[in-house]
Amino acid sequence: MDPVNLAEVTGSVAAIGYGLAAIGPGVGIGIVVGKAIEGMARQPEMTGVLRTNMFLGIAFTEALALIGVGLGFVWQG
Amino acid sequence: MSGIAVLASEGDTWSPPSLAEFFPPAIFFEGTPLQIDRINLIGFLMTGLVALFFVMAFRNPQVVPGRLQNVGEVAVDFVRTFIADEILGKEGKKYAPYLATLFFMILAFNITGITPLLNMPVNARIGYPVFLAITSYVVFNWAGIAKQGVGTYFKGNLFIPGVPKVMYVLLTPIEALSTFVLRPVTLSLRLMVNMLAGHLMLVLFFSAAWYFIFFPNHFLQPVLGIGVFGAGFAFTLFELLIVVIQAYIFTLLTAVYIAGAVSEHH
């Protein structure tokens, strides 16, 4: 029996995958920066510490999105 | 930009930039393991420039600093105040030289991505970030072992105190993986992929602008090309921000890892 294609995706699947992969880190960085700014607005004297920790949080969250960029090139099936 | 050079020779067909961007033809020692191409030459150039700058700035330090020494002091003081002292506290002085070296090497290797005529971030080649990450890995592990001794250091990192004994079955492999494997891997990948993605974006914008302006299929395309060129210029400025932030984050994370290794209680 021949396999029947019920649905087929053509074009760049990697681009769709990266789009999906970017949702999580996007929301994550939004939360990190938003909360940091909220904290700075409430306690301006803590701005320095908050900014440093904000960049740390961004670095960890952003790594996921960047792995998505890399995988698209590594795995060009 | 090499993408534009390719386009100019091909005429009116346009192809998106690919990873071939990052592997230009060899210049010296072709075929040997020590093959040197354009990116390596940029790396040598930037290493030389950074070394030259700091040697010139601090070769003959005065109590009242001259012009170049002043710039050098501001630069080193930035890393000292905002990274070393802020994260490491009183240990900061000891590690400030390494952190400053790291920061300015990464900055120099990144900034070539938006320097006219060079146009290639050296850190987009995985070898450079990997080497920097390995040095950071050695430094933070050495710092922890020197401060706490081999046994205490690994025990503190692998067996977190204050956790039920049964949980170590689950926690120890996770801790080992995240501390001793994923830290250097994410350090190098974060830097490399950021530079790679930024460079590809710039090539995309400027090669598309070139194509629209010089090989239009429609009379409105040159107008679109000018718009795309403007967007490319805006992205160049955005890249400048990314370049500095990535150098800052790499150095900051190294400082955080060192701070975690030298602190007594985990």
Image (cartoon, coloured by chain):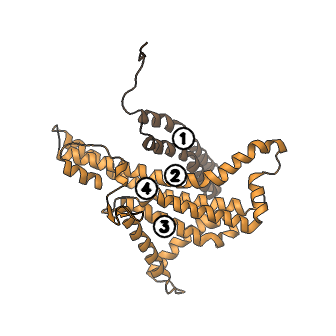
Chain colours: A brown, B orange
Distance CA(mark 2)–CA(mark 3): 17 Å
Q: Considering only vertical position in the picture, is A43 above or below B222? A: below
Residue type at mark 1 is Pro
Q: Foreground residue, B66 or B94?
A: B94
For label 2, the residue is: B189
Give x and y (percent) for residue B259. 68, 62
Mark found first going from the N terminus, 2 or 3:
3
- Mark 3 belongs to which subunit? B
Residue B164 visible in the current orientation: no
- Mark 1 belongs to which subunit? A
Mark found first going from the N terminus, 2 or 4:
4
Q: Residue at x 37, y 58 (%)?
A: B120
Give x and y (percent) for residue B7. 23, 49
Q: Are marks 2 and 4 on the same chain?
A: yes
Q: Considering only vertical position in the picture, is B194 above or below B45? A: above
Give x and y (percent) for residue A45. 64, 57
For label 4, the residue is: B124
Q: Foreground residue, B161 or B62?
A: B161
Q: Please identify, in this view, whether the residue under mark 1 or under mark 4 is nearer the observer.
A: 4
Q: Please identify, in this view, whether the residue under mark 3 or under mark 1 is nearer the observer.
A: 3
